[in-house]
Every structure is written in C-alpha cells, then in structure tokens.
Image (tube, rainbow, N blue to C red):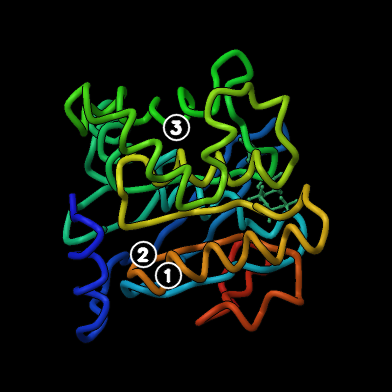
Amino acid sequence: MQTQPQVAAAARTVPRPLIELKGIGRTFQTPAGAFHALKDIHLTVRQGEFIAVVGPSGSGKSTLINVLTGIDSPSQGEIHVNGEAIHRLNQEQLSVWRGKNVGVVFQFFQLLPTLTVIENVMLPMDFCNTFPLKERREQAENLLSKLGILEQADKLPADLSGGQQQRAAIARALANNPPILVADEPTGNLDSRTSEEVMQLFSLLVKEGRTVIMVTHEREFRQHFTRVLSMQDGRLS
Ligand SMILES: Nc1ncnc2c1ncn2[C@@H]1O[C@H](COP(=O)(O)OP(=O)(O)OP(=O)(O)O)[C@@H](O)[C@H]1O
C-alpha cells in the first residue's frame, strides 16, 4: 500500500498503466438464455486519471465497474492492476485485494445505520488490518477532518445530511489509503450544489495522485474528467 506522499510523487512522474482490461466479457445466464452484458472490452487506465463512464441505462456501466473492482468476475478476458492478475484470484484473495486497493462509493452511501460515522470509517481498517488498532481512530479522524465532517464523527448516519453522508462514505472509501477509487453515480442522490462539492473533493483526490473511475449521468461535470468512456450495448464506443 502506498502512503499519500508516495501516491502524489508517483503521479508527478509519467503516468503508468494502472489498470489493464484485455478482452473482458461478462455473460449472465437468464431464463431467456445467455445475456452478454460486457463484450470484448479493452481498456488501459493510467495512474492519476479521472474517468467518467457514461451511457444509456442497461449499457453495462455498473457491470464494468463491478468487474474492475473485483466485486464480480469476468466470464472472459484478463484484468491486471498494478501488474497483478486480478482475474486469477479466488473470492477470498479478491476481497482482501479489494479492501486494500479499491475504495468504492455508492449512490445511496451504504453506511451501516447502527454504527457511528467514525465507526463506519474504521470498518475497512478492521477488515483488512491495515493499521495497528490504536492508530485506526486517529486515521479515521484525519479523514473526517479532511472531508470537513469531523464534528459529525460520533453521530449516526441518519443524523447527517445527504452531502455529509456522502463525505462520510468517501472517508470510508479512503480508509485504507487505496490507489483506486470507484464511484457508481455518487451524486445521483444529492442536490446540484452538494454534487459540485463532492465532485471538487474527487478532483482534489485525483490531484493527490489517486485514480478515480465514476459512473455518471450528469453532463455538467465533464470539465472535471480527464477522459469520458461511453458504453453502448456492453461495448466501449
Ligand atoms: N446478475 C444479472 N443477471 C442478469 N442480467 C444482468 C445481471 N446484472 C446485470 N444484468 C444486465 O446487464 C445489463 C447491464 O446492466 P448494468 O447494470 O451494468 O447497466 P448500467 O449501464 O449500469 O445501467 P443503469 O444506468 O440503469 O444503472 C442490463 O441489461 C442488466 O439487466
């Protein structure tokens, strides 16, 4: 795992391929027969890119994100991240790999409602054992402070506004200091002002050297992205 200065230093040099998809396919078996949700996807993502994935409903955006992050496995093809062959990992190896390398942000935040905000942020550290026990709270507090919601640390998610909940979810995604952040319509449940604030946060994380891949329907955010990928019928067009 890289520290924040290492992530930033690496981003200042020539960006290197971080994620490589080669001939990726994902087929679902349905009562109507085999459905090819992803078809022969080839894609190289470099460190420090801020990528938008756009396309009509059902075109395969979420399936692509799920395969990229190891939430789902491809039916065909190869995925290499940082030189590691992700498609060869078993489920247990994959979940450990994901916990350390990918932070995921969802449209509906998906914070655990019975845990406080800071407990939610510490969960990935507990799962992956990335920090000594006594450093976890401090790491979580630093993240909440960076995201401007330290005062909300001991509240339950339901006591926060939507924008604050999404900031808490981003803090949780950053808990293990992963090089890759993936977000599936992270502003879909926020008003336009709060959405812009969240986009500026992602842009800041990209400037620090993270790689962010985001599914979005919102055209007005295009100025934030370094690249826009369009999906159509399971293919990148
Ligand atoms: N587990 C599954 N079993 C069968 N079909 C699936 C499964 N998951 C996704 N699909 C199908 O794959 C296609 C792509 O779905 P996906 O959710 O990736 O699209 P999307 O572009 O993210 O759509 P949206 O913008 O509506 O979220 C859809 O036709 C969907 O019905």
Which label is found at residue 147? Answer: none
Q: Secondary structure at mark 1?
A: helix
Task: Name the image quarter holding residue 78.
Answer: bottom left
Q: Tag 3 or tag 2, which sits nearer the N-term?
A: 3
- Amino acid type, residue under disc 3 in the picture: Val
Categorize mark 3 by other alpha carbons within 10 Å: few (<14), some (14-19), many (20+): many
- Closest to the observer: 135 or 18? 135
Q: CA distance from mark 2 to mark 3?
A: 19 Å
User: Does residue 222 lie above or below 163 as drawn?
Assistant: below
Q: Return the residue found at the far top.
A: 114
Image location (x, y in percent) of residue 195:
72, 60
Task: Name the image quarter holding residue 192.
Answer: bottom right
Q: Are marks 2 and 1 in contact (CB under 8 Å)?
A: yes
Image location (x, y in percent) of residue 201:
54, 62
Q: Tag 3 or tag 1, which sits nearer the N-term?
A: 3
Image location (x, y in percent) of residue 118:
47, 28
Q: Residue at x 47, y 42 (%)?
A: 144
Categorize mark 1 by other alpha carbons within 10 Å: few (<14), some (14-19), many (20+): many
Query: In the image, is 48 to the left or to the right of 2?
Result: right
Q: CA distance from mark 2 to mark 1?
A: 5 Å
User: Does residue 207 lie above or below 4 as drawn?
Assistant: below
Q: Residue at x 55, y 50 (%)?
A: 148
- Amino acid type, residue under disc 1 in the picture: Val
Image location (x, y in percent) of residue 175:
36, 40
Q: Are marks 2 and 3 in contact (CB under 8 Å)?
A: no
Task: Name the image quarter holding residue 98.
Answer: top left
Q: Secondary structure at mark 2?
A: loop
- Amino acid type, residue under disc 2 in the picture: Arg
Which label is found at residue 121? Answer: 3
Which label is found at residue 210? Answer: 2
Dot 1 corresponds to which residue?
Answer: 206
Q: Residue at x 26, y 40 (%)?
A: 97
